[in-house]
Image (tube, rainbow, N blue to C red):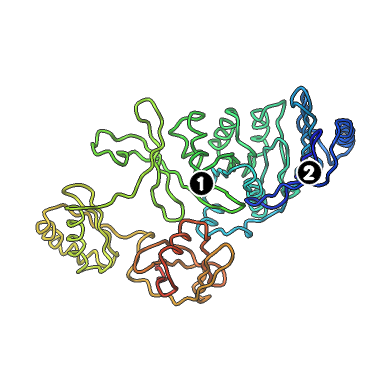
């Protein structure tokens, strides 16, 4: 970007998201007369050139979009002095240029229809939004954008809408008549923007919203109070946080009726929005009404100590006789859930339930025997040989190409880390900046600490 201000040296901001450097272009001091002449020429071109549009024109401020240059002109009485700022996109990226896991790519491609891209100014949100718009367009979807100014770098087949009669509400009325599959809203900021975003999503339009926020939780927080709490998971299903031009965190939202974490009485059950880390499905936060306030509460991993830890170990040892990788979850003082592989369930239950009844008498608790789901290790899976390498942004596991499109579990020193899909050419790519990538880097001191197991889906 170029920054030209009255009685100051011209400045340029160079670099990429996360590593910008402000430098002086030359030692000349810019006069008001020079900047007025320049702004007059810019406005003349904008009014006569088909590739230029005046996006905003108010007393003391104008915003012009000339091809892919966004030009903001401010002067008194709006600003204390004359200033011209010219912004040009650094780079145009496709989704393939990001370190996106196979799991997230499947989500964006097949399931996600209420996406929020959040991040600080200059973090690369709009670049990712442009890549996502082009991705859906290339999949044969009808894609539109809501922008003011219209500066997203998208394919010619994507129509870019601005405010109609000064309001995106009016634009939304027209949008529903053209039947889009996806709409990119850059950016959702004002209260009416949040309502328009929610209204379009609830009508069935796939929405991608760009929101300024310092964290993914802040992005979710901005929707609270603008729309009803209970419909937030229906409006947002995927929250992506961008930092330094890369996807750093992804959250998944789901509405449940339950007792909030940390509370014990069953009569305290209420609608709770669970915010889970998309990479490992770990519950990190909950949103619910407490008194008259809507609160976001962090959910820490409960540490088991004392008698509870001893009880869990005792129960686990009992069921390891049937499944060496049995997992135990204590539900209450007299009830536990045991997760085992499906093939061992008949032997645990026994004929007519005789064996499980005997085990319950022995342990003096009620036992729920549950088949392990896709997040847990499956004993039928086989140890996968692999080679390991790294790129600048990802940890790469290479297995035989015959396993392409199959699923694998990743363990470090026998501790489950994540489940993932084996991609093209037999590669598993784990973004270094993701929670899974950080866990692998932290827990594994060498390749020998890591195990891959092929899953039988």
x and y, in percent, of residue 195 in the image: 56, 30
As drawn, 385 above or below 81: below
x and y, in percent, of residue 378 in the image: 34, 67
304 lies left or right of 122: left
Answer with the quarter of the image where residue 246 lies. bottom right
Q: Nearer the viewer, residue 224 or 374?
A: 224
Asked which secondary structure carries label 2, the reply is strand
Asked which secondary structure carries label 1, the reply is strand
User: Which residue sits at x=24%, y=39%?
Assistant: 264
46 lies left or right of 402: right
Say which residue label 1 marks: 238
The quarter in which the N terminus is drawn is top right
Within 10 Å of disc 1 (Cα), the crowding (few <14, some 14-19, many 20+) is many
x and y, in percent, of residue 232 in the image: 47, 36
Specify which label sits upstream in the sequence, 2 or 1.
2
Query: Residue 69, labelled with which disc?
Result: 2
165 lies left or right of 258: right
């Amino acid at each position: 970007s170029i920054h030209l201000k009255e009685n100051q040296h011209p400045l340029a901001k160079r670099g990429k998201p996360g590593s910008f450097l402000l430098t002086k272009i030359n030692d000349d001091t810019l006069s008001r007369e020079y900047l007025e002449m320049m702004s007059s020429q810019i406005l003349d071109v904008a009014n006569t050139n088909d590739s230029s549009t005046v996006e905003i024109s108010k007393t003391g401020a104008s915003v012009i979009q000339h091809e892919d240059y966004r030009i903001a002109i401010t002067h008194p009485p709006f600003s204390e002095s004359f200033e011209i700022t010219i912004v040009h996109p650094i780079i145009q990226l496709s989704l393939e240029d990001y370190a996106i896991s196979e799991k997230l790519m499947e989500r964006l491609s097949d399931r996600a229809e209420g996406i929020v891209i959040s991040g600080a100014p200059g973090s690369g949100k709009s670049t990712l939004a442009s890549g996502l718009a082009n991705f859906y367009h290339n999949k044969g979807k009808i894609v539109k954008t809501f922008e003011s100014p219209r500066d997203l770098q998208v394919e010619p087949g994507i129509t870019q809408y601005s405010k109609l009669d000064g309001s995106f509400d009016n634009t939304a009325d027209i949008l529903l008549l053209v039947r889009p599959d996806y709409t990119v809203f850059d950016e959702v900021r004002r209260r009416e923007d949040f309502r328009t975003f929610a209204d379009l999503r609830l009508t069935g339009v796939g929405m991608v919203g760009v929101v300024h926020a310092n964290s993914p939780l802040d992005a979710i927080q901005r929707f609270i109070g603008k729309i009803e709490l209970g419909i937030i998971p229906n409006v947002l299903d995927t929250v992506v946080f961008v930092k330094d031009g890369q996807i750093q965190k992804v959250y998944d939202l789901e509405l449940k009726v339950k007792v909030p974490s940390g509370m014990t009485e069953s009569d305290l059950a209420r609608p709770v929005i669970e915010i889970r880390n998309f990479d490992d499905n770990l519950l990190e936060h909950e949103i619910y009404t407490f008194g008259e306030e809507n609160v976001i509460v962090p959910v820490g991993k409960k540490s088991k100590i004392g008698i509870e830890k001893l009880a869990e170990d005792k129960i686990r040892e009992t069921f390891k006789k049937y499944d060496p990788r049995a997992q135990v979850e204590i539900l209450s003082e007299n009830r536990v859930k045991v997760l085992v592989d499906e093939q061992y369930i008949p032997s645990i239950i026994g004929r007519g339930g005789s064996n499980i009844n005997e085990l319950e008498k022995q342990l003096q608790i009620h036992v729920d025997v549950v088949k392990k789901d896709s997040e847990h290790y499956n004993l039928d899976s086989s140890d996968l040989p692999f080679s390991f390498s790294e790129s600048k942004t990802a940890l790469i596991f290479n297995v035989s190409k015959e396993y392409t499109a199959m699923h694998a579990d990743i363990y470090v020193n026998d501790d489950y880390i994540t489940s993932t899909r084996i991609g093209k050419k037999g590669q598993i790519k784990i973004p270094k900046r993701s929670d899974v990538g950080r866990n692998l880097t932290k827990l594994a001191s060498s390749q020998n600490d890591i195990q891959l197991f092929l899953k039988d889906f």
